[in-house]
Amino acid sequence: MSQPKVKMYSLSTCSHCKATKKFLGECTIKYEFVDVDKLEGDERKAIIEDVKKFNPRCSFPTIIIGDTVVVGYKEKEIKEALGMS
Amino acid sequence: MTPQELYDRMKTVQEAKGYYFNKDKERTFELLEALIANKENYGYMGCPCRLLSGDKELDRDIFCPCVYSVPDIEEFGSCYCNLYVSQEWNDGKIPHEYVPERRPPEKMPY
């Protein structure tokens, strides 16, 4: 079964974001991520608007797995969305 | 300032209030390093788990320890970042639930 597309909006300083990256790495899940705190100016504004579409509170990490949005490092929800459980 | 110096300084102040550093030292020092990085980049020790605006006044509520850490530790035994926790949380006497964001959306300046 192919893996759903995984995209994460994260912060470079956030412990939950680091834990999520580590978890996905350990599970050998391919994913893209954007560290929003590292962006500046218009690019930052545009990405924040993207995050708000998925998670109006704009908290991190916001993880998009296929059609599912997981807010925060919630291992159980991430595994379910990945079809691992 | 080194993470160890920050640790030593905050430990004394916070433990007197009944708040403890997460006993997972790796996690704690990772967060302390992030706080020091935020101080260097933004000029203030804003929460490492939230997007800082760069405006000190707008982010005053999330200077670490943030104003939300008090009710979060009261309700969940831990702050949003899992940096400051209660003794019971560290002792594993209460479940380590994910702490939801308590900061009201209208406080977020973006």
Image (cartoon, grey):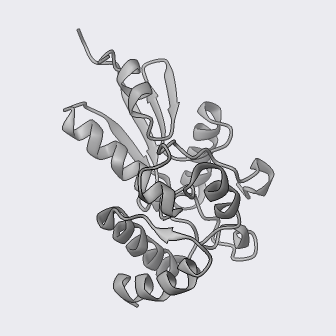
B26 vs B14: above or below: above
Q: Position of residue B107 (x, y in %)?
A: 77, 57
Q: Is residue B82 above or below residue A29?
A: below
Q: Residue at x 37, y 29 (%)?
A: A6
Q: How many marks?
A: 0
**Residue at coordinates 35% horizontally, 52% vertically from top-left?**
A18
Observer-nearest residue: B109 or B47? B47
Name which residue lies at 62% across and 51% down.
A45
Position of residue B67 relative to residue A7, above or below, is below
The quarter holding residue B72 reads bottom right
Residue at the extreme top of the image, as rendered: A1
State the residue at coordinates (48%, 55%).
Answer: B89
The C terminus of chain A is located in which quarter?
A: top left
Out of B40 and B29, give the one closest to the viewer: B29
What percent of the width, then of the height, locates residue B32?
42, 74
Residue B5: x and y, percent? 39, 89
Residue that lies at the very extreme toward the right in this rendered image: B106
Q: Is residue B80 or residue B46 the one in the foreground?
A: B80
Q: Quadrant of the N terminus of chain A?
A: top left
Q: Is B14 on the left-hand or right-hand side of B23?
A: right
Horizontal side of residue A52 vs B82, given as left or right: right
Q: Is residue B25 left or right of residue B55?
A: left
Q: Is residue A28 above or below residue A43?
A: above
| Image location (x, y in percent) of residue A75 | 38, 33
